[in-house]
Image (spheres, grey):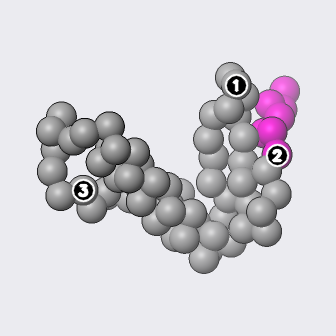
Amino acid sequence: MIILLYGGASKSVFEMTDEEFEQAAQNILRRAKEKAFSEGLPIYFGRNGKLMAEYPDGRIEEVKKEL
């Protein structure tokens, strides 16, 4: 598991404009991908109520729940 401890934003999210917030979110996502992919790990995210995984090779797949 990779945990990013610092997002690198120059101010609190409560003080950001919508544009600044979006830029900070994109920077955090980019850093998460770089870190995970450099270790051969996927990143996980939700899309339309489903858990998805994006892999270093660019594949995006739904994560199926195993019983």
Q: Residue 9: which disc?
A: 3
Q: What's the amino acid at mark 3?
A: Ala
Q: Secondary structure at mark 2?
A: strand
Q: Magenta span covers which residues?
A: 61-67
Q: Is residue 60 above or below residue 67?
A: below
Relative to 1, residue 22 above or below: above
Count of picture labels: 3
Mark closer to the chain start, 2 or 3 = 3
Name the quadrant containing residue 28. Answer: bottom left
Under circle 1, the secondary element is loop
Residue 49 showing in the rendered view: yes
Contact (CB < 8 A) between labels 2 and 3?
A: no
The percent coordinates of residue 50 (x first, y second) are 72, 28
Provide the residue designation for mark 2: 61
Q: Residue at label 1?
A: 48
**Residue closer to the observer: 29 or 5:** 29
- Residue at (52% x, 70% y) in the render: 35
Q: Is residue 13 visible?
A: no
Kindly identify the residue that appears in the image at 38 percent across and 52 percent down: 23
